[in-house]
Amino acid sequence: MKKQNYILGIDTSCDETSMAILDENKNVISNIISSQVDIHKQYGGVIPELASRKHMEALYVVLNEALDKAGITLNDLTGIAITNTPGLVGCLLTGLSFAKSLAYSLNIPFTTVHHLKGHLFSPFIENPLSYPFMGVVVSGGHTSIYYVKSFHDIELIGQTVDDAAGEAYDKVAKLLNLGYPGGPIIDKLAQSGSKKFRFTRAQVKRGKQYLSFSGLKTSISHLVKKNDISDEEFCKNLAASFQYEVVEAIIEKVNFLLEKYPAEIISLSGGVACNSELRKKLSKEAHQKNIKLYYPKPILCTDNGAMIGYVGAFQLDHGDHSAWDCNAFASLSF
Ligand code: KG4
Ligand code: ZN
């Protein structure tokens, strides 16, 4: 009887240890995420060295859980996909070393996956994949827009010149003393506030395809200095105003880029793709333009092994096997 293919996808790029098993049709049959958020939130952000150590503790536990949930054993695995860039280099190395040793001991191939490619393709885990599409990746570390003609033909067509959207959410939440990560907290708070404050949208000199969020964050820090952050109304209204500006800025960029890069499909991904207002407004915009908008369910928006396994499965199909001496990199484009 022919052996079934099962791919293990691993992501340890930041503060989540995640592993997923995909079957040979690239269906996700388990996706385990062990978050370190409770450890890092007391510091208001991720402490890299601590994160690496926590990954070391979690790796075996998460692997066993992923295998159990999928109903398979280690010997059923036929390939491994592992994020090796971008991310916190110590964290990436824990996952990469683990993946290499597992692949070596099982005598199966492994393939390194670019974390952003994982996010970019994540909407297609549960939607039909077809090309070309415009991919909007909005995460804690990146805000980038791509035009994707095929799996290997991907053009970066727009990006932020400073803070990523998620980073801006996290920084504003810190200014308001709301906790970490800031995105979901501000998203919820914004729903009961009104957009009382207006901000001037940054015009990046380098070109209209660029975004900038650092000026917005500075304007907010000035407002925070002049107001009382224990005033709930102020915080709600500021959250609503900030969220409005972030979402509008992203949509403005998408509309601008659609003129040069017409697409029938937009994929929205990354942690900020969980944002209720971004989902709603971009859906409306896409609907008016007769464009299909795909975004993953929330658990597949933030970091996860499933998206790495999904992209890795295509790479393994193409015979793209990584070498034993491959390395991890804090940042690398693709
Ligand atoms: O993709 P991700 O898990 O990690 C990176 O690769 O960076 O994204 C995490 C980011 C955090 O900055 C978090 O605040 C943001 O996603 N985020 C949100 C929401 N949920 C998570 N931002 C806005 N609204 C949300 N609902
Ligand atoms: Zn990510």
Image (cartoon, rainbow, N blue to C red):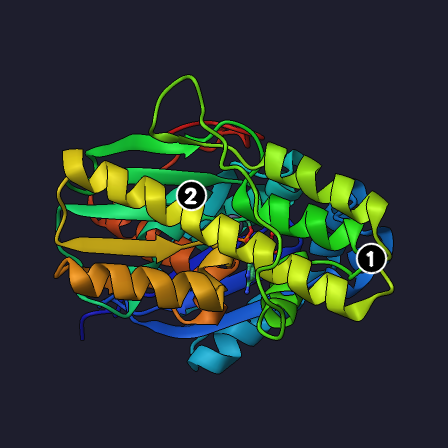
| Residue type, mark 1 in image | Asn
| Residue type, mark 2 in image | Leu
In the displayed structure image, the side of residue 203 where residue 65 appears, left or right: right
Task: Answer few, some or many: residues within 10 Å of disc 1's Cα (few below 14, many 20 plus, some between 14 and 19).
Answer: some
* SS label for mark 1: loop
Task: Answer few, some or many: residues within 10 Å of disc 2's Cα (few below 14, many 20 plus, some between 14 and 19).
Answer: many
- Looking at the image, which is closer to me, 327 or 214? 214
Q: Earlier in the sequence, mark 1 or mark 2?
A: 2
| Quarter of the image with the C terminus in it | top left
User: Residue shown at 49%/37% (left/top)?
Assistant: 201
Q: Which residue is mark 1?
A: 177
In the displayed structure image, the side of residue 127 where residue 117 appears, left or right: right
Q: Which mark is residue 116?
A: 2
Numbered disc total: 2
| Quarter of the image with the N terminus in it | bottom left
Residue 103 at what x, y percent from top left?
Answer: 46, 49
